[in-house]
Image (tube, rainbow, N blue to C red):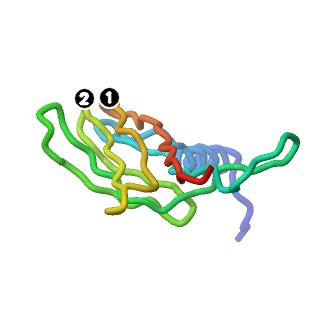
Amino acid sequence: MSTALRPGALLVMGVLLLGACSTAAPPGEGGLEGRVWIGPMCPVVAAGTECPDQPYQAELDVSDEDGDIVATVVSGEDGRYRVSLPPGEYTLIPRSPSSGIPWAEPAPFSVTSGEWTALDVHYDSGIR
C-alpha cells in the first residue's frame, strides 16, 4: 500500500488550505475591524526623533442610524478589534475615561453584506 498522494488530491488540499487562509467574510457575514492607536507618547517631540503612536486597549460603542448602541467591543492589547454587524450605516463612538483624556472623535462608517469595513481609531493622549 502506497502512502503517496495523487496529484488531484494535492490540488484539492491546496485549494482548501488557501480558502482557509482567506480574509474575506463568508456570504452575509461582515462588520467592522481595525486597530486603536494612542499618541503622541512623548512629552516633547524634537525633529529627527521618533515618537510613534502605540496600540491602545479601548472600549468602543457602535450606534445605528437612530443613535441606539447596537454593539460594544474592546480592542486587545495590540489595539486590534473586530465586531460583526449587519449591513447598514453606523457610527463608531470611542469611549474615554471620566477625565475625558485620552479622547477620540466618533467616526461614521458603512457595512456592506459579506465585507469587513476597516477603520482605525486614533486617541489623543493629551501629552504636549
Horizontal side of 67 relative to 99 (left or right) equals: left
Horizontal side of 2 relative to 40 (left or right) equals: right
Measured Cα–Cα span from mark 2 to mark 1: 5 Å
Q: Secondary structure at mark 2?
A: strand
* Residue picked out by circle 2: 89
Residue 124 image position (x, y, % from top left): 52, 47
Write the residue at 49% across / 45% down.
34
Q: Amino acid at mark 1?
A: Ser
Q: Secondary structure at mark 1?
A: strand
Q: Quadrant of residue 18?
A: top right
**Above or below for 51 versus 74:** above
Horizontal side of 37 relative to 2 (left or right) equals: left
Label 2 crowd bin: few (<14), some (14–19), many (20+), radius 10 Å: some
* Residue picked out by circle 1: 110
Earlier sequence position, callout 2 versus callout 1: 2
> Which of the image's four quarters has the N terminus?
bottom right
